[in-house]
Image (tube, rainbow, N blue to C red):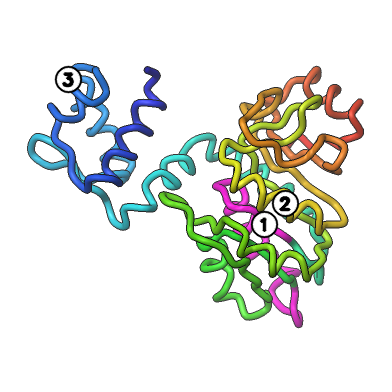
Amino acid sequence: MSRDARWKALLELLVEQGRLDVEEAAAALDVSSATIRRDFDRLAEQQMLVRTRGGAVVHGVSYELPLRYKASRHAAEKQRISAAVAGLIAPGETVGLTGGTTTTEVARALAARPDLASGSPALTVVTNALNIANELAIRPQFKIVVTGGVARPQSFELIGPLADGVLGQITLDVAVLGVNAFDAVHGAAAHDEDEAAINRLLCERARRVVVAADSTKLGTRAFARICATDRVDTLVTDSAASDRTAAAFGEAGVRVVRA
């Protein structure tokens, strides 16, 4: 098991149980106690958990842990991507934002834009992500629309058919998708089918679609398809994306921006 997979498993166990001791975690993950102690120490340094004698407890609100861990990975790349995505959105537009760490950074980049500091509204943002809605709701110049749905465990996203009622009655200028995978042949995809269904609805209601994904997600596949490649207008990724990868998306009709 890789370190990233092990850390994710540890955080998920903490979310479920609230507290873990070293021996229990070592047995659950089939690794040595010394490895778990080092993992706990590193995660405590990143404020993902609180170290205790012989174990660890959750840090702050437990359901934030998996999202906070994902946000710490490829952070610099995600910030560059989010700034580039925010630059594609014009004042007054209606923007759909899916859940995810990259789209959360897009929301923050939009909030920081001086030309969006005022307006009636400066932007209309439609999202199924409770954390994005919470961050932007304090911006009086933004009109925030939250889809219906059921909160997904260990996530800030609303999923399920209740969102259809809202999304079926609106139109978007642009939908910004956070994805788990994007392949030039197989399209954009997510690991969870309910998440993919909501993202697909946002795509269907949008005049243009932007995928925001770091280079590790390109050329890969995930379980649940969101949309075909030809439905995506622009891919914003990081500079580590290869020329070959960029060319494949370009040939499929997708504009590629490497931030």
- Of the numbered discs 1 and 2, the one sitting upstream in the chain is 1
Q: Assign a secondary structure to mark 3.
A: helix
- Name of the residue lying farthest toward the left: 53
Left or right of 23 on screen, residue 216: right
Residue 127 placed where, x, y %?
A: 64, 62
Magenta stretch holds residue 110: yes
Amino acid type, residue under disc 2 in the picture = Val
Q: Label 2 crowding class (10 Å Cα cut-off): few <14, some 14-19, many 20+?
A: many
Look at the image and give the residue range highlighted in magenta: 96-122
Q: Name the residue under label 1.
A: 97
Q: Assign a secondary structure to mark 1.
A: strand
Can you tell which quarter of the image residue 81 is in? top right
Q: Name the residue under label 2.
A: 176
Please say if 159 is above or below 80.
below
Q: Mark 3 points at which residue?
A: 34
Residue 191 placed where, x, y %?
A: 57, 36
